[in-house]
Amino acid sequence: MKMFATLHGDQGDRCQGSKIVTIVNITCQTRYNELENQNEVVVSIDKLTLRSSFVVSAMTLGTLSGCASFFGGATDEVPPATPASTSVPAELPTPPPPDVIPGLQEGAESNAVGSVTPVEGLGNLQSGAILGGVPINRDSISDPGHPLAQRTVFFGYNSSQLTPESLDLIRGHAEYLSRFTDVRVRVEGHTDERGSREYNIALGDNRARSVAKVLELGGADPGQFSTLSYGEEVPVDEGSNETAWRRNRRVEVVYEGYN
Amino acid sequence: MIILSAVLSKNKQPLSIVACRNFVSLWQSITSWVEASMHRILAITALMLSILLIAMSSAYAQLTIEITETAGVQDKIPIAIVPFADDVPGGVQVDIAKVIEDDLIRSGRFSVVPREQLPSNPATGTEVTFSDWRSTNVEYLLIGKVSGNPATGLVVDAELIDIVQQKRLLVLPANDQGQLQYCCRYQISQPQLRRTSHAIANLVLEQVYGVPGVFDTQFVYITSTGSLNQQRYALEMADIDGQNVVRILEISRPILSPTWSPDGEQLAYVSFEFTGRSAIIVHHLARAERRKLISIEGINGAPAWSPDGRRLALSLSHRGSPDIYIVNVASGQLSQLTTSPSIETEAAWLDDNTIAFTSNRSGSPQIYRKGLSADSKAQRLTFEGPYNAGATASPDGSKIAFIHNDDGNFRIAVQDLDTGVLEVLTNGALDESPSFSPNGDQILFSTTENGVDVLGVVSVDGLVEQRISLANENVRDPAWGPRR
């Protein structure tokens, strides 16, 4: 199923009066996850032009509502899609992560990082929800007590899907990069030790590109980040157990010159 | 550097073989190597990297090989191998009979009579008294001798005798004087004794089982040592019996996926030695030349040499999701083979025009087959289980070996492409990186033992298994080299 949502609206003070025109190509797909023995709904966002990351939240919410029919029997309990022209509520729930695993639209245009239109200036986000509103300044990444000291996000088995907490953290790093455009990061993807080494390189690459896409959507310039997948080659935990595997399935945002 | 000159010297001083049909092809390949080298020098145009090669040293940890499961072969062929006689001044440095014995035992298909139980020690066929062997259960007898001088060259003669039928085997056509010749005579220098011993073991296996032996082949693998963040990674090469370990490259960042060119002269592998990007390196062994074939944004992975040796299949993700590309090794010209937005990687060549590869287009990794022509559609090959990845093709392209999730354990499975029948060959939990022997009879793979990475060798019939380990080092990601 594909949804094409065109959002038009004046977001008023939240977006400092800028007119927002957003065109989104959203795909909802349900698939059976053989490894976890359950159905999962996958949402992919192909292209968007936006002025505020809040719009991402609104769209994601709307999209998930549109995906509701994929949850068998649960349709009634899901609210209808947020009307495109209404203003964004002040308190949006943290959106479920957009899944950016490529590969769910056979024959679709490549959803390469480079094909996403970059977001322009994020406005007054420091008062918003990102990182719980903790102020960001140039020294934030050198401050071990700052939320941006956290540079690692974790993933489920064989998945490139970001959790809501991870999405928030990556948006925080995106915000930092959008303000300090001389800073560069390397987005390094890793997997656990199980399975094929080269498939794990590819899986780590998917994870790194998931994070890179959020960086770009959050305002970082594509020139400020690159991706690198190590697959299973560089574990942080050399154990062979569930705990070690969970710790190793990760993406690290490496600030060049700061680590 | 010394390592590589040693490798080179093997090529420059081919085994001198007299009256042994199996080595005619070796001669031809060596001759063509010399000719081809002239032309290939012109083909090297790419950036020559700074050489990180390590001087050869005998100090490297020795690989230990043990047979872990031999119960499977019910009827091992009993063979007696008599210590080779020698009249060489100063003696011979290599116990030829012992090398052959070790080879045949590792094959899992022979039982070798202990030396102290040999009833007699003949050195030539004419010295064999068949009645000596009646009381034993021996079916075959291998004998031989070494003559000559270490300074001027050695001559090794070997003969295989069928005790049951009481006849000398490996008989070659009569020479000009009408005399029958009994294989085989090798005119060699002292350093070639081990390889000559392996060549004799090859003949025994072929004569008795009809399968050409691969005892004189080599393999490459990756080692790692040190704790987290202080790892050292090395690419090493050794004879398939674990001897003659050569360190080809040592760096502080990961190396993976070594793959041989079909002529055995070059390796391609993935290196993380450059900050921020992986790279596919093409490494000419004898010339000690490395060149960066490709290193672009995204992954640079899964190199696989085409059977004709002119192309590499590899995986790139600079346009988004990982896809398979074909690159012309000489010109560097790239063409994209897969375009699906899912993961496509791990190409293995079934023939010069067809590859098998891993894709997660169905939602989980599975193996597919696709021709190189633009209109060729991918055909799914694996259907059992939630995870099949990392395929490698048998030398004749009739089978693939790959990693199969067997009830939560990652094991090596083999699948016949005609029948589609899948068979799990190993019993580990983290088995990976399968690689066929050049005769298609065995699969080399990596596994773990007590938390350490070790290698395994399993026969394609699943009956014989070996472990190859290194003291205090992880050893993994093996690739079995071609015939020499």
Image (spheres, coloured by chain):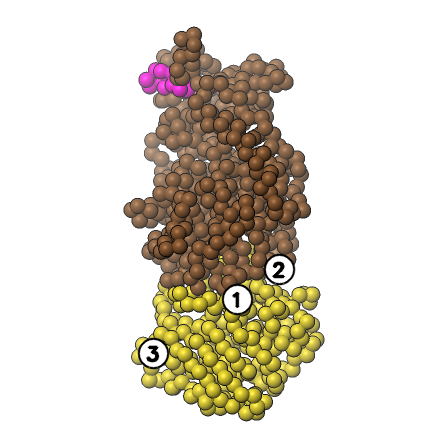
Chain colours: A yellow, B brown
Identify the residue at image location x=53%, y=71%: A213
Decide whether residue B266 is among the magenta residues.
no
Going by the numbered disc 1, the residue's amino acid type is Arg
Q: Secondary structure at mark 1?
A: helix
Q: Secondary structure at mark 2?
A: loop
Please give the chain letter of the residue carrying mark 2: B
Residue at position x 45%, y 42% in the image? B307
Q: Where is mark 1, residue-wise?
A: A209
Considering only order in the chain, which callout, 1 or 3, is on the residue closer to the N terminus? 3
Label 1, label 2: how far apart the Cα atoms are: 14 Å
- Per the model, the C-alpha gap separating discs 2 and 3 is 43 Å
Callout 1: few (<14), some (14-19), or many (20+) C-alpha neighbours within 10 Å? Answer: many
Q: Residue at x 64, y 72 (%)?
A: A149
**Where are the magenta residues, as a range?**
B158-170
Q: Which mark is residue B276?
A: 2
- Give me the disc on residue B74: none
Q: Residue under label 3, please give it.
A: A69
Q: Is residue A167 left or right of residue B457?
A: right
